[in-house]
Amino acid sequence: MAHARSTERGPDDRGTSDKALNTAMVIDDHPLFCDALSMTLRAVLEVQTVKTAECLKGALERLGEGLSPDIIFLDLNLPDVNGLDGLLRLINAAPSVPVIVVSSMSEPRIIASAIRAGARGFIPKHSQRSVFRDAFDAISAGEVFVPEGLYMPNEDVAPEGEQEAALTRLSSLTNQQARILNLICEGKLNKQIAYDLSIAETTVKAHVTAIMRKLGVQSRTQAVLIAQEARFSSIAQGEGSSF
């Protein structure tokens, strides 16, 4: 029997309990898996319409054109994006739609990071059909879903030692770099960050390079993970922050 971790959510948080599940979106670059999941959603959840996209760009374009799915199933590894970047950008584009990560990777750190980034659930690709029903029921009840047998840390924050290490690295960022990292955590691209901060995109790129160097990471996704370990968005927005 599947289990879910309870969460506290306000009236504006993403959920599915207030309306029928008419339309679902599946974002995965493997056609056979898309077809199989589409059949599962129609059979198990009685979804009327399933829209698919093989890359994040295609999904964002459909959302921009007015597609309003009731739920989204996302693979973390896509041709045009890898890791949490895609999840963050998707949530930023459709903040009212619950997103469930469906992945072949089920390491505890990946699951925890996806949930902290805003995913409403995590389902391994090898799961039985019934797991998707369990996931939908949990989300409808305002919970975050993780199948039984998968380890999901109960703590909402990283262990103290990891937090301290993350804070030490984050403390080296300038105020502008901290603001840019916070926007990266919101899933924004360099062009959007440049607009928000009224600076040149080349300046943003230079800051992003400096941020990754100071944090000792090779990608934006890794920078986001470090920020999450330290609950950086809360710290960066706090009064009197040294960042």
Image: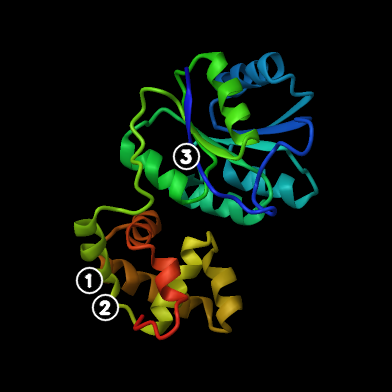
Q: Secondary structure at mark 3?
A: loop
- Name the residue: 46% across, 73% down: 180
**Can you tell which mark lies on residue 172?**
2
Q: To which quarter of the image does residue 218 belong?
A: bottom left
For the residue pair 215 and 202, the one nearer the viewer reads as 215
User: Exactly how many numbered labels are in the figure?
Assistant: 3
Q: Amino acid at mark 1?
A: Thr
Kind of residue indicated by mark 2: Ser
Measuring 44% from the left and 18% from the top, which residue is drawn there?
Answer: 126
> Label 3, on which residue?
76
Name the element at disc 1.
Answer: helix
- Using a 10 Å C-alpha cutoff, classify the residue at mark 3 as few (fewer than 14 neighbours), some (14 to 19) or many (20 or more): many
- Separation of marks 1 and 3 at Cα, in angstroms: 29 Å
Residue displayed at 56% across by 28% down: 135
- Circle 3: residue type: Leu
Q: Residues within 10 Å of mark 1 (few under 14, many from 20)?
A: few
The dot on residue 153 is none
Residue 168, disc? 1
Q: Spatial distance from mark 1 to mark 2, Cα to Cα?
A: 7 Å
Residue 141 position in % (x across, y down): 62, 35
Q: Where 193 sits versus 68, above or below?
A: below
Q: Which secondary structure, mark 2?
A: loop
Circle 2 Cα neighbour tier, 10 Å, few/some/many (<14 / 14–19 / ≥20)? some
Residue 132, image quadrant? top right
- Location of residue 170 with respect to 55 vertically, above or below: below
Disc number lying in front (1 or 3): 1
The label nearer to you, 2 versus 3, is 2
Specify whether 222 is left or right of 125.
left
Of mark 2 and mark 3, the one earlier in the sequence is 3
- Identified at 22% across, 65% down, the residue is 164
Residue 82 vertical placement versus 52 (above, below): below
**Where does the image place residue 10, in percent across and percent down from the top left?**
64, 54
